[in-house]
Image (spheres, rainbow, N blue to C red):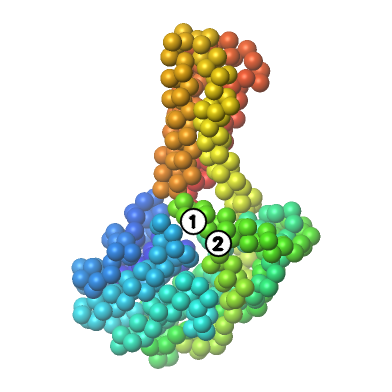
Amino acid sequence: MRVLLLGATGLIGSAVAARLAADGHEVVGVARSLDSVARRVPVARWRRLDLRSALAPGDWLPLLEGVDAVVNCVGVLQDSPRDSPSRVHDAAPRALWQACVQAGVRRVVHFSAMGVDRGGLSDFSRSKQEGDSALEASGLDWVILRPSVVVGRPAYGGSALFRGLAALPLLPCIPNAGPIDIVQLDDVAETVSRLLDRPTHMEGRTAPSQVALELAGPDRLAFEDVVAAYRRWLGWRPARRIHVPAFLLAAAWKAGDLAARLGWRPPIRSTAGAEIVRGAVGDSSGWTAATGIRPQSLEAALAANPASVQERWFARLYLLKPVAIGVFALFWLMTGLVSLGPGWNHAVDVMEMTAAARLAELAVAGGALVDLAVGALILWRPTARLGLIAALLVSLAYLLLGTLLLPALWADSLGPMMKVWPILALNLVCLAILDER
């Protein structure tokens, strides 16, 4: 079959793409940006489309030519400059369902989320339910999949957060966190495979149609028990459990919301907080009856894939990443502000000791503005890589100009020339861990 796959660069979408390609389907991936992530996903061809602007059936019809089925794996957590749940979960899919009717594409497999049919607690769950309702009313041959928290060997979002929390010396317990029926990514991809490859896998069953299936794992776990399971998997001794005060959690959600406004996608945001309290539990009996899949437990999946040193590195670096990038951006911003404020006279005095004494004030002001610009570029996610590259080049320029204009600075063991080297090292680390997935 030729399958149009939305969200093909995401955690679930990339796994589904690999599985469908292995089954022999021709996968046409849809993504907002065709960057290095897209080059790693095995699809036959790519179509670029930003769902935030694909709000009419005519935006979708060219993508549906020759398509036999549509799989929608798109999901965004919260409103931000990069994301819009109401458009991505409801308005754009609503237009797609209408286009499918017009194009004669009947089969649709649509990913929603566990619990959205029981009442929306956030824009995420409400918009998911509205998109589901539009599909249910479309008359298409649809299956809605509502997975619990999905984890697998790849890690992104919540699944990555479990690993990051597992690396902490203390195991945080979130008050009022609801239970979770963890589901494995391989089982989710297998489900889509069976729904699209009926003769091979359905074993005489009638292919499910116009039904919503809850994809829930076999074990109901507390949030901290999931983290503890990952800690055991990573080979670390059990950590002492601590209850996180409500005010610290509120501050963490707000910090995540602020990062999202700057274009980042942290898993810790106010929407995540609401969904964590709700939990993610369901009944997998309908899933098993429809597909024959018996979901794997978290412990069994982890035992089947022992953790490698790469996993331990990732877990330790995950929560250090925002700290490193935030501190680095703050360093450049504070350097600029100090140069323009309390450090002005000292900076001018140093410049007057060089061959560029006549341009001392201009040089200090220009350097301060460059530092401020670099810090701002690093903070804004769409320009973060450019900012880090600019920081690297500016640091090297400072070394070169300092050597030419005032070589005596090298004689100071705690002076600016020596301090540039750890700055360069941190710069390279931030560049190395910048990718989100």
Q: Quadrant of residue 248?
A: bottom right
Q: Quadrant of residue 237?
A: bottom right
Label 2 secondary element: loop
Label 1 secondary element: helix
Q: Quadrant of residue 419?
A: top right
Whether residue 361 can be seen here:
yes
Q: Dot 2 surroundings within 10 Å: few (below 14), some, or many (20 or more)? A: many
The circle on residue 426 is none
The one nearer the camera, 140 or 52, is 52
The one nearer the camera, 25 or 360, is 360
Where residue 130 appears, x then y in whole percent?
Answer: 40, 79
In what quadrant of the picture does the N terminus appear? bottom left
Please report the residue visible at 48 percent of the width from the left and 65 percent of the height from the top: 77
Amino acid type for the residue under numbered disc 1 = Ala
The vertical placement of 163 against 377, above or below, is: below
Please report the residue visible at 34 percent of the width from the left and 55 percent of the height from the top: 33
Q: Earlier in the sequence, mark 2 or mark 1?
A: 1
Please report the residue visible at 37 percent of the width from the left and 55 percent of the height from the top: 38
Whether residue 293 can be seen here:
no
Q: Is residue 97 left or right of residue 289?
A: left
Q: Is residue 40 left or right of residue 405?
A: left
Distance from label 2 to label 1 (Cα)?
8 Å
Please report the residue visible at 48 percent of the width from the left and 49 percent of the height from the top: 435
Q: Is residue 217 left or right of residue 138?
A: right
The vertical placement of 431 against 288, above or below, is: above
Q: Mark 2 near mark 1, Cβ–Cβ under 8 Å?
A: yes
Furthest toward the right, the residue is: 240
Q: Which residue is mark 1?
A: 260
Q: Dot 1 surroundings within 10 Å: few (below 14), some, or many (20 or more)? A: many
Amino acid type for the residue under numbered disc 2 = Arg
The vertical placement of 77 against 145, above or below, is: above
Q: Which residue is mark 2?
A: 269
